[in-house]
Image (spheres, grey):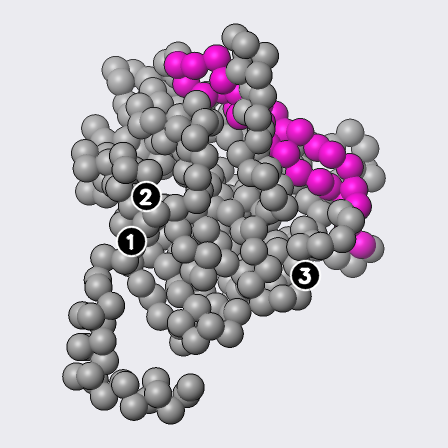
């Protein structure tokens, strides 16, 4: 299926975001995408689709690690996956905001105050290479539906907040086609700081699946908060940048280490650090950091 105009693609993304309260609220960090062809879809929550004035006070519910989640079930506008009879359907539990509550429930943790924004794109971006399309979202799961067989399945089997998703497209003639057999999701499933709320203070991991929504798997460590990734389509690799909870206190702070990783998409293995531990330890010795690290134990 070829999209002959960019507006068709943007409308598909915007439709899914509008149904679930907006891709990016004014109180949320904006996505930084370094690609010349990427079009950002930014939606204020006040402009979200609503049947009544009461519906304008609906927002994705705060996701608790344990305990009941109150609210209505909302299935977003289906997103067709190109060249396949597969639909991707956003899912969220939504509830009414409080009288004075205008915050994004995912960002209330305060992690964004460190200045970390999820940066995505394509390695060595050029117009002929696959370009990222997607954006920041507030979903609690993603469903897939096969129109041919009637089968449907979920991306995740646990409580979660999906805060970002990315597909990849390539210009063909006067249109765009989804060419890379890959969908990437940024997901929070672990209550890292133990406050019983899944938000931007907790680990943010990358999940990937095939372009038809199958074979989903986590590829990044559980003790890391992913802050950026790049696709190298020729080598079939993802390059990741992460904040690692280097002092194991359950928090991701500006003082924690920044570590780059890579993931070979064809092996099915977890992402691996690019620089070895031995090299980092030798660097610590040169900088006199070993005594500092040992004194903190």
Determine the image quadrant of residue 49: top right
Mark 2 vs mark 3, CA separation in Å: 30 Å
| 289 shown above or below 116 | below
Please rate how many residues cluster around mark 3, counting C-alpha atoms within 10 Å: few if below 14, some from 14 to 19, many from 20. Answer: some
Give the quadrant of the N terminus.
Answer: top left
Mark 1 vs mark 2, CA separation in Å: 9 Å
| 194 shown above or below 78 | below
Q: Residue at x 39, y 51 (%)?
A: 220
Say which residue label 1 marks: 272
Q: Secondary structure at mark 2?
A: loop
Q: Residue at x 51, y 30 (%)?
A: 13
Please rate how many residues cluster around mark 1, counting C-alpha atoms within 10 Å: few if below 14, some from 14 to 19, many from 20. Answer: some
**Relative horizontal placement of residue 217, taking residue 128 as reference (left or right):** right
Q: Position of residue 9 (x, y in %)?
A: 44, 24
Please rate how many residues cluster around mark 2, counting C-alpha atoms within 10 Å: few if below 14, some from 14 to 19, many from 20. Answer: few
State the extent of the magenta-drawn residues as a range: 70-98
| 288 shown above or below 4 | below
- Identify the mark nearer the N-term, 2 or 3: 3
**Relative horizontal placement of residue 49, taking residue 134 as reference (left or right):** right
Q: Secondary structure at mark 3?
A: loop
Q: Residue at x 46, y 27 (%)?
A: 213
Say which residue label 2 marks: 269
Mark 1 vs mark 3, CA separation in Å: 29 Å
Q: Residue at x 67, y 55 (%)?
A: 65
Q: Foreground: 239 or 46?
A: 239
- Identify the mark nearer the N-term, 1 or 3: 3
Q: Position of residue 281 (x, y in %)?
A: 22, 76
Disc 2 versus disc 3: nearer the observer: 2
- Queried whether the magenta region covers residue 260, the answer comes back as no
């Amino acid at each position: 299926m070829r999209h002959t105009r960019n507006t068709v693609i943007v409308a598909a993304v915007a439709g899914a975001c509008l149904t679930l309260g907006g891709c990016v609220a004014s109180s949320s960090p904006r996505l930084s995408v370094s690609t010349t062809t990427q079009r950002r879809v930014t939606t204020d929550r006040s402009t979200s689709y609503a049947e009544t004035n009461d519906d304008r006070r609906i927002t994705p519910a705060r996701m608790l690690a344990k305990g009941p989640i109150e609210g209505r079930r909302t299935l977003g506008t289906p997103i067709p996956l190109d060249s396949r009879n597969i639909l991707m359907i956003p899912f969220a539990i939504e509830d009414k905001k409080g009288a004075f509550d205008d915050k994004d429930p995912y960002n209330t943790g305060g992690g964004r105050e460190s200045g970390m924004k999820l940066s995505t794109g394509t390695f060595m971006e050029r117009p002929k290479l696959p370009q990222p399309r997607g954006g920041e979202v507030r979903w609690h799961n993603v469903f897939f539906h096969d129109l041919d067989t009637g089968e449907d399945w979920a991306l995740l089997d646990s409580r979660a907040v999906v805060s970002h998703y990315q597909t990849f497209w390539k210009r063909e003639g006067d249109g765009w086609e989804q060419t890379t057999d890959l969908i990437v999701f940024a997901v929070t499933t672990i209550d890292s700081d133990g406050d019983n709320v899944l938000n931007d203070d907790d680990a943010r991991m990358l999940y990937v699946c095939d372009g038809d929504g199958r074979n989903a798997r986590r590829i990044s460590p559980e003790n890391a908060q992913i802050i950026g990734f790049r696709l190298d389509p020729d080598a079939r690799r993802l390059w990741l940048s992460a904040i690692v909870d280097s002092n194991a206190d359950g928090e991701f702070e500006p003082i924690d280490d920044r570590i780059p990783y890579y993931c070979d998409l064809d092996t099915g293995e977890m992402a691996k650090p690019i620089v070895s531990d031995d090299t980092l330890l030798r660097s610590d010795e040169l900088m006199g950091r070993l005594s500092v690290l040992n004194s903190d134990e």
